[in-house]
Image: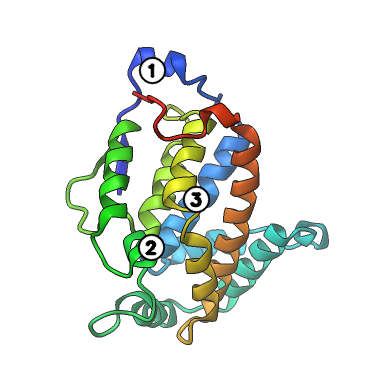
Amino acid sequence: MTQALGPEPAAAAGMDAIACNAEARLRAGTYSILANLLASPPNQELLDLLKTIDRSDGAADTLLGAAWHMLAAAAETASLEALEDEYHDLFIGIGRGELVPYGSWYMTGFLMEQPLARLRDDLARMGLERQEGVCEPEDHAAGLCDVMSIVNTEGEVVALDIQWQFFERHMLPWMPKFFRDLQQAKSASFYRAVGQLGEQFIDVEKEFLGEATPEERRSLDTEVV
């Protein structure tokens, strides 16, 4: 939903940007998978990728590892036709789907409200802009995961404190509940595993980003561009 323009040179020097290492690539990859699964039903290529997830006994020792295990198992038995129907029932429906995957809706009960305006301001401050041809508002769950994938991608890495500010303001207030709702949705089958992965990953991200960000750098009022 967005593309990174990259920070100005002076801003980059002041942000203490993190190196693009294996950890950043792993986080970017996880966010990218969630973004793709939430933006549309998975195609065969994505299903085949999910089937390659390590399902050895040791890989499921953590809640996040178990969630990956569940997603791989769900991919093994899923059919493209069934996934099309499931996605439609969950997120599109007739009039609307069972779930409404937008931050404004979860935080205010309405679409296109103040949380979306604040999000657009903060995206601009981070040097991100909306791609042409994208119809969904930026506060779609897929779009927010896409942003976090982009800012952890080589060449576009954004400092962890800026990531924390974005995550705490625009994702943490509602996405844990959204992912729990997804697990409990009547229309969900394969997407129960997606909800489990999302919930556990958001929990891990909360701990990781919170611990990595000094308290004095936690406010979005901090100048970032």
Q: 122 left or right of 189?
A: left
Q: CA distance from mark 2 to mark 3?
A: 21 Å
Q: 177 left or right of 88?
A: right
> Residue under circle 2?
107
Q: 127 left or right of 66?
A: left
Front-most of residues 134 and 205: 205
> Residue under circle 1?
11
Circle 3: is it few (<14), some (14-19), or many (20+) Cα within 10 Å?
Answer: many
Q: CA distance from mark 1 to mark 3?
A: 25 Å
Mark 1 / mark 3, whichever is N-terminal: 1
Regarding residue 86, the answer to whether it shows in the image is yes
Secondary-structure class at tag 2? helix
Q: Amino acid at mark 3?
A: Tyr
The percent position of residue 87, horizontal first and vertical second, equals 39, 76
Q: Amino acid at mark 1?
A: Ala
Q: Which residue is depicted at the point 82% across and 63% down?
A: 57
Q: Report if the CB atoms under discs 1 and 3 are less than 8 Å apart.
A: no
Regarding residue 127, the answer to whether it shows in the image is no
Q: Amino acid at mark 2?
A: Met
Circle 2: is it few (<14), some (14-19), or many (20+) Cα within 10 Å?
Answer: some
Locate residue 197: give its quadrant: bottom right
> Residue under circle 3?
31
Q: CA distance from mark 2 to mark 1?
A: 31 Å
Q: So how many labels did they put on this image?
A: 3
The percent position of residue 208, horizontal first and vertical second, equals 64, 42
* Quadrant that contains the C terminus: top left
